[in-house]
Image (cartoon, helix red, strand yellow):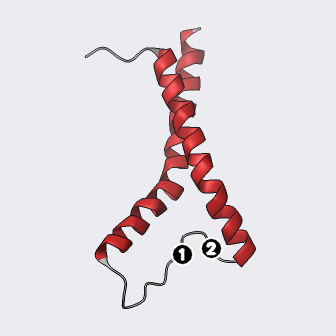
Amino acid sequence: MPDPSPARRNGLFWLLLILWIAIAVPITLFSLLTLELPLWPSFPAESTREGIALWAFLAAWYYIVPVVLVLVGRRARRTKQEGR
């Protein structure tokens, strides 16, 4: 299977970055206003599995996606520099 074109990969990178920023900025601002760590839960007894799963997905999105974006961005820059 051929590699997607560089323009498409670049577009997907920026789309994912913009989407992450749109979700992460409000979470971060709310955490700053309430002086709490972002997405640090304390689940009451009434919590459902679905609620905890939703929190886990959102926390993974908040904490893991920036790491992946940095690694992908560095790899793209390194590949671009080696290609010159």
Q: Tag 2, which secondary structure?
A: loop
Q: Are marks 2 and 1 in contact (CB under 8 Å)?
A: yes
Within 10 angstroms of label 1, few (less than 14), some, or many (20 or more) residues? few
Q: Residue at x 57, y 17 (%)?
A: 80
Report how far apart the C-alphas of labels 2 and 1 lie in the structure.
Answer: 6 Å
> What type is the residue that disc 1 sits on?
Trp
Q: Is residue 70 visible?
A: no
Q: Which residue sits furthest top?
A: 84
For residue 34, above or below residue 80? below
Q: Residue at x 30, y 14 (%)?
A: 2
Location of residue 17 in the rendering, given as x and y in whole percent from the top left corner: 57, 39
Q: Tell whether 14 sits left or right of 51.
A: right
- The disc placed on residue 40 is 1
Please tell me which residue lies in front, 27 or 81: 27
Residue at 66% from the left image edge and 77% from the top image edge: 36
Q: Is residue 76 above or below residue 24?
A: above
Q: Secondary structure at mark 1?
A: loop
Whether 63 is drawn above or below 10: the answer is: below
Q: Which residue is mark 2?
A: 37
- Name which residue type carries label 2: Leu
